[in-house]
Amino acid sequence: MSTIMQYILSGLAIGGIYALVALGFHIMWSSAKAVNFAHGDTLTIGALLTIMLLAAGLPLWLACLLAIAAGGVFGTLVERFAVRPFAAHSGSIGWMLATIAIGIMIESLATIETNGYSLPLPSPGVERAVRILGAGVYPQELLIPLVAVLATLGLKLIQRHTLVGRAMQAIAHDKQAASLMGINVNAVVALSFGLASLLGAAAGILIAPVVQASATMGVLLGLKGFAVAIIAGITSAPGVLVVGLLFGVIEKFVEGYISTAAREIVGFSLMILVLLIAPQGLFGKREVVKV
């Protein structure tokens, strides 16, 4: 029983990270029908910048806030200079190549700064493990899925009860019509990319005390977050949350009962299987194009 609970709790922790990353992809795709493929690197930016600010003498809470804000600025700049110029041309996938290139540059810069080493991020949440039904887990790991749930609920509240949220929904429905109604489409899209990167930077800060921060920490996490978004149906925020948490739990059971290598095989095989059965994702809706 304790082993099963250990896998569930550990799976919910890493699944919460997948959900936060996937939620960022959902926000970007909903507003721009494009995504930042350097999104995983926002985790690296959040984690490593927090460590650097701590080394400069800032308190943990302020270092975290500044790192998250920097992540948001990064996402906004990526949208302005790597996505918008290409997205303006119908059918162009230049934004995909541009954001991948930016991700590689971020990883290279982070490798130079860290000399290729992993760095610890101190946190009160990993000082002592707690016992839950025989399973040992850090409070930091319990915090991650809670933040993922709150982020999803917060996004839904923003979309339903704020002008910016309604503008995001209008742009997702019909960008041209939204523009004709007086909505500043470029500003809202840039804000969406910034918000997505805020979540990515926060995810990096949350997971770094558990796995340590490194130049490449966001590569696989970003790829799996994208896989979660596709499996769930990238248009559904609640679906992204549910699939992210389940994906993490499944991974931990496969890792525990089979092997770490099998974890990746099973995870991405599930993605392929789901797309074969439901191309729009488990919770996604088919997009109808009127001609």
Image (tube, rainbow, N blue to C red):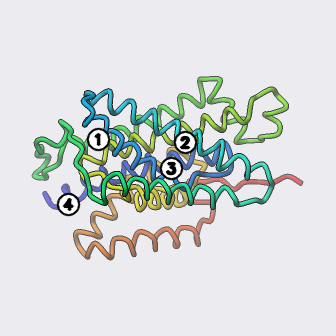
Q: Residue 227, which numbered label? A: none
Callout 2: helix, strand or loop? Answer: helix
Evaluate if marks 1 and 2 touch, with contact meaning CB atoms under 8 Å apart: no
Which quadrant is the C terminus positioned in? bottom right
Q: Secondary structure at mark 3?
A: helix
Could you tell me which residue is drawn at 68 percent across and 32 percent down? 187
Give amino acid for label 2: Gly
Q: Work out whether 59 lies above or below 228.
A: above
Expressed as whole percent of the image width and height from the top left, the position of residue 194 reads 55, 37
Judge whether 218 appears above or below 130 on screen.
below
Q: CA distance from mark 1 to mark 2?
A: 20 Å
Gap between marks 2 and 3, in whole Å?
A: 23 Å
Which residue sits at x=36%, y=46%? Answer: 204
Mark 4 / mark 1, whichever is N-terminal:
4
Earlier-in-chain disc, 4 versus 2: 4
Q: Earlier in the sequence, mark 1 or mark 2?
A: 1
Residue 219: image location, x then y, percent: 43, 60
Q: Earlier in the sequence, mark 4 or mark 3?
A: 4
Marks 4 & 2, CB-CB < 8 Å contact: no
The answer to whether 47 appears left or right of 163 in the picture is left
| Residue where numbered disc 3 is placed | 239
The residue shown at (41%, 34%) is 150
Give the position of the N terminus as an image quadrant: bottom left
Q: Cβ–Cβ below 8 Å for labels 4 and 3? A: no
Crowdedness of circle 1 by 10 Å Cα count: few (<14), some, many (20+)?
many
Name the mark nearer the viewer: 3 or 1.
Answer: 1
Q: Which residue is mark 4?
A: 4
Query: Which residue is the site of mark 2?
Result: 75
Q: Can you give x and y, in whole percent of width and height, for residue 238 in the image?
A: 50, 44
Q: Which residue is mark 1?
A: 51
Q: CA distance from mark 3 to mark 1?
A: 33 Å
